[in-house]
Image: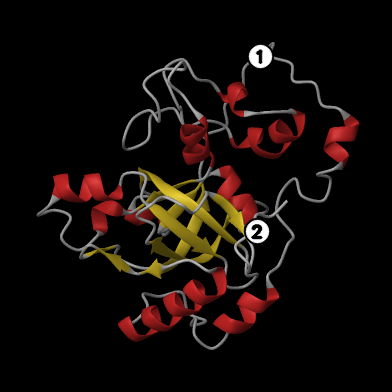
Amino acid sequence: MLLSTPGVNVALHAGELSAHEDGITKAEDKNVLLVAALKGHVPEEMRKLTDTEDEAISKILSEKLKMQVEPELEGIRLNRTYGMIGGEQHLYRYPGDNLYKHAGNASDWAMYGPAGIAPGLGAWGHFAPSEAAFDENDKERERYYLAVQTFLAPGFAENVGKYRDFFKFRKMLVANPKTGQAVVAVIGDAGPAAWTGKHLGGSPEVMHFVGLAGGPRKGAVLYYFIDDPKDEIPLGPINMKGGRVS
């Protein structure tokens, strides 16, 4: 459900909006080299990948995107690595947060504001204990968060505490195999429910940068853990050379 607050006026300047005129609903940048590299490895049918397929695809992503991508870390893996992502709403970042504080400018509001804000908190609560403690790292985590079916991971029921700590803000790569668009994100929530037919959810920004923000706001993506023990890889959209997408 989209939330709105009567009486709050956000000034939309034509000059700011024109810069994003063609990108309000989805990113158009298409990484044809990554698409070509994945061709023949990603099945047409959206299903669980075999270990052999996972190995081949994670190797391609690691080499092309210059980061170590793995289907399993520390003996833990998700129930799948290829599935349907759906659009999520923004999350409350700290007590007293609201939807309008998420927009840095008018263009931000026009592009991401309509997604609304979820009525409840993410699986790990707020991203920061207070607005005073809220920093850029917290901001980026909410901006590029995923809702992942952590509860369906093999071994979760037997190791709830261990798995909960492992998944909290775990860095992941999400890639659209049809366009080559990819984003570095973190696990910020648990879901969606199995009955929805979706396997993970993406923040409005994640959906934008994987090219799935328009229309039904869903589509097939690859998603793998990023092995980044020194926390050197920044969150956000990436290109083939590991740079940021403007």
Helix, strand or loop for disc 1: loop
Label 2 Cα crowd, 10 Å radius (few <14 / some 14-19 / many 20+): many
Identify the amino acid type marked 1: Pro
Instruction: State the CA–CA distance, disc 2 to disc 1.
Output: 31 Å
**Is residue 224 shown above or below 105?**
below
Residue visible at 50% across and 20% down?
97
Q: Which residue is mark 1?
A: 6
Comparing 132 with 87, the one in front is: 132
Comparing 165 with 83, the one in front is: 165
Residue visible at 49% across and 54% down?
233
Helix, strand or loop for disc 2: loop
Q: Is residue 108 left or right of residue 58?
A: right
**Is residue 116 shown above or below 180?**
above
Q: Which residue is mark 2?
A: 211
Identify the amino acid type marked 2: Gly
Q: Quadrant of residue 74?
A: bottom left
Residue visible at 65% across and 54% down?
244
Q: Is residue 234 left or right of residue 31?
A: left
Q: Quadrant of residue 48?
A: bottom left
